[in-house]
């Protein structure tokens, strides 16, 4: 949302400042240390009507399905914390990542298990990848044939990396990350498993090393200041996995190499890549306050669209020209960006890490700005028509989040209400047919329904002025001014 000072509908700048205090927060356009949670804005005429699925990440094992007002219509109590999100399948089951305790590696996104959970919370299928030599992380994808694609890390020793040509000067003795010592490489791989849990296909980044346009450069490294683990042992840090049945291609995305890929499912060849030509020795590298030819910075969630384009969450972190997140749509035939959304003020929408995008059937885009638990929907002409801030903070609902709810991760800005991905599902989604979707209660009981009070022309709750002395009859009232595009709210 964007707020201008002293709007015409407000009677004084003092009232405007009060409004700013009520609306502000770390995830919005102006800086503040306190902000409300729940649904902040809802335009029923323009938002895509449906149900939103969220899996709060911190100290929470529950996945929630919410109506447009932020009420719970269903929830799943699960065994594990999310790793890192859940999605709704056509049969009404969840496909959900889980995070067992004590993983062998901690590099951001580590999980370990993928489960299919029915409407009543029973696990009907699972696949565990959680051993000293391989760990499931970030993401997964159910294919049309019923198989499941799973993203994992596999352990490679420093000696194996040296044998593949890694520069020894870029290999540390060991790295401490999240309290765990690391002394080996963990490159990415993809495994396809069937319903019986048998592996039917695999793809390994380790098999595609080199400096060519269809290879991955083992010596393309990030600066140590980004995080020593990411400059060394977590070399590629893939975070997206998808499947395109029309072309039989796998979609992958690398945060560290700042590009997404199309992999031939039959041959394993890297057939297309986009986002950062400098990762394979092409184009101009970024420099001081100059992005060069690198388009993406730390991206997540590359999604194939029905029109053949790709929708991407570009985090914009460590970007030379300015740290600013955006959702963008690109045409792979031309390599050009054809649509993008970024907030007018970078503090209104920015996630240094994580993030997601979903194109809705009405053409709107649902964006998850993960770090602040901030989910919002924008129209093709870039108007925000629904906005939500997750009130579940370390497993407990809160009406207001404050600076004390920060996760203590420095300039990454990750709050304890973080959401990796949110998904919106249509009311006629096949998995919801015949389900009880009545309101079970608010997500945050006792909290104000913010969006209901956020209306054009509402007063700020100021006391009425004292009665004036009797006067001559007033002249006929002037026609009411049209309502401004930017509502006010009642004070509470």
Image (tube, rainbow, N blue to C red):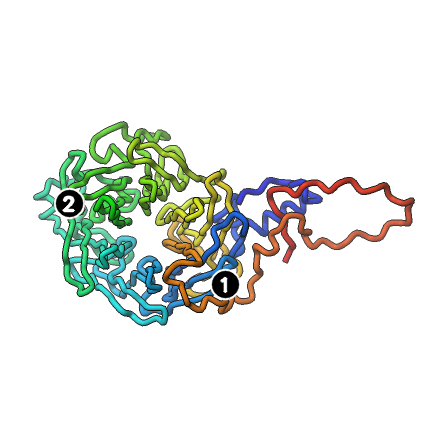
Say if residue 237 shows up in the picture: no
Tell me: residue 53, above or below residue 328: below
Q: Secondary structure at mark 1?
A: strand
Q: CA distance from mark 1 to mark 2?
A: 44 Å
Against 463, residue 223 (above or below) is: above
List the single residue furthest toward the left: 163
Left or right, 91 with reference to 208: right
Mark 2 is surrounded, within 10 Å at the Cα level, by few (under 14), some (14 to 19) or many (20 or more) other residues, namely some
Residue 36, x across and y down, in percent: 53, 55
Q: What residue is drawn where x is 18% and y is 59%?
A: 193
Residue 287 lies left or right of residue 363; in this view the side is left
Observer-nearest residue: 112 or 482?
Answer: 482
Residue 71's label in the rendered image is 1
Q: Residue at x 44, y 47 (%)?
A: 362
- The residue under label 2 is 268
Q: Count every numbered label the image shows and give the total.
A: 2
Looking at the image, which is closer to me, 6 or 74? 74
Q: Residue at x 23, y 29 (%)?
A: 282
Task: Say the numbered circle drawn on residue 243.
Answer: none
Indicate the position of residue 276 as horizontal and vertical percent values: 27, 35
Secondary structure of the residue carrying tag 2 is loop
Pick the residue in front: 45 or 392. 45
């Amino acid at each position: 949302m964007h707020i201008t000072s002293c709007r015409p509908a407000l009677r004084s700048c003092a009232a405007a400042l009060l409004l700013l205090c009520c609306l502000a927060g770390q995830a919005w356009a102006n800086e503040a240390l306190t902000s409300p949670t729940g649904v902040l804005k809802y335009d029923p005429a323009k938002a895509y009507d449906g149900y939103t699925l969220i899996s709060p990440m911190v100290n929470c094992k529950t996945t929630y399905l919410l109506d447009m007002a932020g009420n719970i219509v269903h929830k799943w109590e699960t065994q594990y914390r999310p790793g890192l999100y859940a999605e709704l399948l056509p049969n009404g089951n969840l496909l959900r990542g889980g995070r067992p305790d004590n993983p062998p590696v901690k590099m951001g996104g580590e999980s370990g298990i993928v489960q299919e959970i029915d409407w009543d919370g029973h696990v009907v299928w699972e696949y565990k990848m959680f051993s000293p030599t391989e760990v499931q992380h970030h993401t997964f994808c159910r294919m049309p044939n019923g198989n499941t694609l799973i993203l994992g890390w596999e352990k490679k020793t420093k000696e194996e990396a040296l044998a593949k040509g890694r520069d020894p000067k870029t290999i540390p003795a060991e790295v401490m990350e999240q309290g765990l010592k690391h002394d080996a490489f963990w490159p990415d791989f993809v495994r396809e498993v069937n319903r019986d849990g048998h592996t039917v296909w695999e793809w390994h980044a380790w098999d595609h090393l080199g400096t060519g346009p269809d290879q991955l450069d083992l010596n393309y490294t990030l600066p140590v200041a980004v995080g020593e683990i990411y400059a060394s042992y977590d070399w590629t840090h893939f975070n997206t996995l998808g499947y395109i049945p029309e072309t039989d291609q796998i979609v992958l995305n690398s945060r560290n190499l700042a590009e997404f890929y199309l992999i031939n499912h039959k041959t394993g060849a890297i057939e297309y890549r986009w986002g950062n030509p400098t990762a394979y020795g092409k184009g101009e590298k970024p420099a001081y306050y100059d992005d060069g030819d690198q388009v993406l910075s730390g991206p997540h969630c590359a999604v194939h669209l029905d029109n053949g384009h790709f929708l991407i969450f570009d985090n914009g972190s460590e970007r030379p020209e300015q740290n600013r997140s955006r959702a963008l749509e690109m045409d792979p035939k031309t390599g050009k960006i054809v649509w993008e959304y970024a907030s007018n003020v970078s503090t209104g929408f920015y996630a240094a890490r994580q993030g997601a995008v979903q194109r809705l059937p009405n053409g709107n885009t649902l964006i998850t700005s993960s770090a602040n638990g901030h989910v919002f929907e924008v129209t093709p002409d870039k108007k925000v028509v629904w906005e939500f801030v997750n009130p579940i903070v370390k497993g407990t609902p809160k009406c207001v989040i404050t600076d004390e709810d920060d996760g203590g991760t420095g300039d990454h800005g990750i709050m304890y209400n973080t959401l990796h991905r949110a998904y919106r599902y249509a009311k006629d989604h096949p998995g919801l047919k015949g389900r009880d979707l009545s309101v079970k209660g608010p997500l945050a009981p006792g909290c104000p329904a913010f969006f209901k009070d956020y209306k054009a022309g509402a007063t700020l709750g100021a006391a009425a002025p004292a009665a004036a002395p009797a006067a001559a009859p007033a002249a006929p009232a002037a026609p009411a001014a049209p309502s401004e595009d930017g509502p006010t709210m009642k004070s509470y």
